[in-house]
Amino acid sequence: MGVRVMAGVILVLGIAIGDMGLAQPNEFATGVVEANGLTFHYLEAGEGPTVLALHGFPDHARSFRHQLTALAEAGYRVVAPYMRGYAPTEIPDDGYFGVPALAQDAIALAEALSDEPVVLMGHDWGAAAAHAAAVVAPERFSKLITMSVPAGIAFSQSLRTSPEQQRRSWYIFYFQHRMADVAVPLNDFAFIERLWRDWSPGWDIPIAELTSVKATLGQPGVLSAALNYYRHTFNPPPNAPQVGTGRGPQQIQVPTLYIHGREDGCIGVELADGMEAFFDNGLRKVIVEGAGHFVHQEKPDEVNRVILEFLE
């Protein structure tokens, strides 16, 4: 399979991953796999064609708990890894967290988990990784499902030209300063809770899930890794591996479904306008009313219905 699966899947009922307190007790199977030189831990549900689901920030693999259940019931195998640096997945020795590395992770995970092309699904940073992976290795992916971060140049342009998006994205610039390492975890990660509430203003946030994310970010090295996703976007380290998608946006050949919440307080829905130009093999774009940035958690029934229509 290209990359060796290190451990058999273990069915977990009422036990957190590794009994480390990193997640709410869950009903999902867990597994471990080597990919792109890292040991990834993941949640898994179902049997059938593989759907690889990549989470974003501030989040972790349980972000896809609703999709794990619904897609498994529909006949798919859904695998949701903890992204590089998010415990219990390893922190890379080279300390690099740029999108090129995330794309290579996605490609290597697809190769490790299935001999056939997989469906690649991503939210937030996972969406950025999925878009890049589809450019680099379109043959590895049968379909693409991305959420809350549009493909193309609109978002990067908006950081220069849109006062409204600059206001939404203030945290990105704050994360460039080392003060963030001290401030973000204070008062039980109050900073993270405020982001969730600002980004999804109409969501009745499940406190147990928010607590689970805070527990993950509180593990040694995880917060620094998560902040480096943003820092390496603007200032990649000198030793950054020369892998990835080259300069500028490139065309995506994989049939794609894109989902964005109308009330997204992180990335304005208007930034999804015109992204069709970057897809050569079809793009279906769905705007979900009454949902914010965590659209797949806020409106799971609607999102799952749209996903299954797209897949089937």
Image (cartoon, helix red, strand yellow):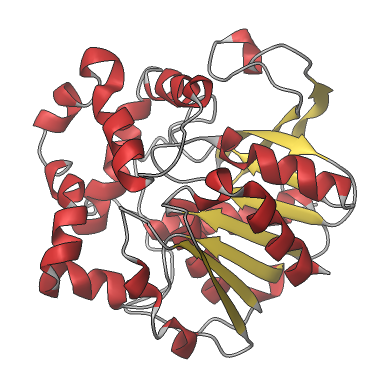
Looking at the image, residue 79 sits to the left or right of residue 96; the answer is: right
Seen from the viewer's position, the closer of residues 36 and 182 is 182
- Mark count: 0
Whether residue 130 is visible, yes or no, is yes
Looking at the image, residue 162 sits to the left or right of residue 244; the answer is: left
Seen from the viewer's position, the closer of residues 57 and 241 is 57
> Which residue does the image show at 81% across and 28% down from the upper left?
9
Q: Is residue 128 above or below residue 28?
A: below
Q: Is residue 127 above or below residue 59?
A: below
Whether residue 34 is visible, yes or no, is no
Looking at the image, residue 251 sits to the left or right of residue 16; the answer is: left
In the rendered image, residue 215, in percent from the top left (x then y), is placed at: 44, 18
In the rendered image, residue 254, in percent from the top left (x then y), is placed at: 64, 78
Which quadrant, please, contains the C terminus? bottom right
Residue 57: quarter of image = top left
> Which residue does the image show at 14% across and 56% down from the upper left?
167
> Which residue does the image show at 82% across and 27% down from the upper left?
8
> Which residue does the image show at 51% across and 40% down from the upper left?
83
Looking at the image, residue 98 sits to the left or right of residue 145; the answer is: left
Seen from the viewer's position, the closer of residues 137 and 259 is 259
In the rendered image, residue 287, in percent from the top left (x then y), is placed at: 51, 68
In the rendered image, residue 196, in percent from the top left (x then y), is placed at: 36, 38
